[in-house]
Image (cartoon, rainbow, N blue to C red):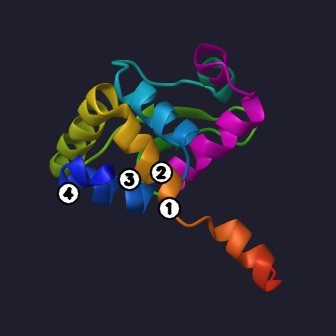
Amino acid sequence: MHESLPSDVAEFIREHITSLEQLEILLWLRRRATCGFTAAEVSRDLRTLESSALKRLSALATRGLLERTGDSRTATFCYRTLAPDLDATLGRVDEAYATRRYSVIDLLFSKPIDDLMVFSRGTPR
């Protein structure tokens, strides 16, 4: 159960992560010492669709968790944070994902899915 996760890890996941793919992309970029990865490179390494990787990368950049350079056709991404406490928390998220993967996945899948709730209400976004 996700109760076994440290509170800052669970809070970070609840507030910033919307999917397992997004989490894996963020952690993948965090582990790289270099910058300037394209969605194609990320998707190739993580074996996901390029369009999906681009969507996740863009969402992470919008949330301030990644740095984005270039336009939509030449976009590159880099993990860079100005908040040392956020980087430290993400380090603990990475550790939890490596050692308590089931708990992290359980937490992710227990979150409400906004798009389904919007659809069920019939409210356009």
The amino acid type of the residue labelled 3 equals Ile
Say which mark, if any, is on residue 111: 1
Q: Is residue 8 left or right of residue 109?
A: left
Q: Residue at x 51, y 32 (%)?
A: 25
The furthest residue to the top: 45
SS assignment for the magenta stretch, majority: helix
Which callout, 4 or 3, points at the residue further toward the start of the chain? 4
Q: Are marks 3 and 2 in contact (CB under 8 Å)?
A: yes
- Name the residue that disc number 3 marks: 13
Say which mark, if any, is on residue 73: none
- Name the residue that disc number 4 marks: 7
Q: How many marks?
A: 4
- Name the residue that disc number 2 marks: 108
Disc 3 on helix, strand or loop? helix
Which callout, 2 or 4, points at the residue further toward the start of the chain? 4
Disc 4 on helix, strand or loop? helix
Q: Which residues are magenta?
A: 43-62
| Percent x, y of residue 109 | 52, 52
| Percent x, y of residue 19 | 55, 47
The amino acid type of the residue labelled 2 equals Leu
Q: Quadrant of the C terminus?
A: bottom right
| Percent x, y of residue 106 | 44, 47
Disc 2 on helix, strand or loop? helix
- The crowd level at tag 2 (other Cα within 10 Å; few <14, some 14-19, many 20+) is many
Which callout, 3 or 2, points at the residue further toward the start of the chain? 3
Q: Residue at x 38, y 53 (%)?
A: 13
Which callout, 1 or 4, points at the residue further toward the start of the chain? 4
Q: CA distance from mark 2 to mark 4?
A: 14 Å
Mark closer to the observer (1, 3):
1
Q: Are marks 1 and 2 in contact (CB under 8 Å)?
A: yes
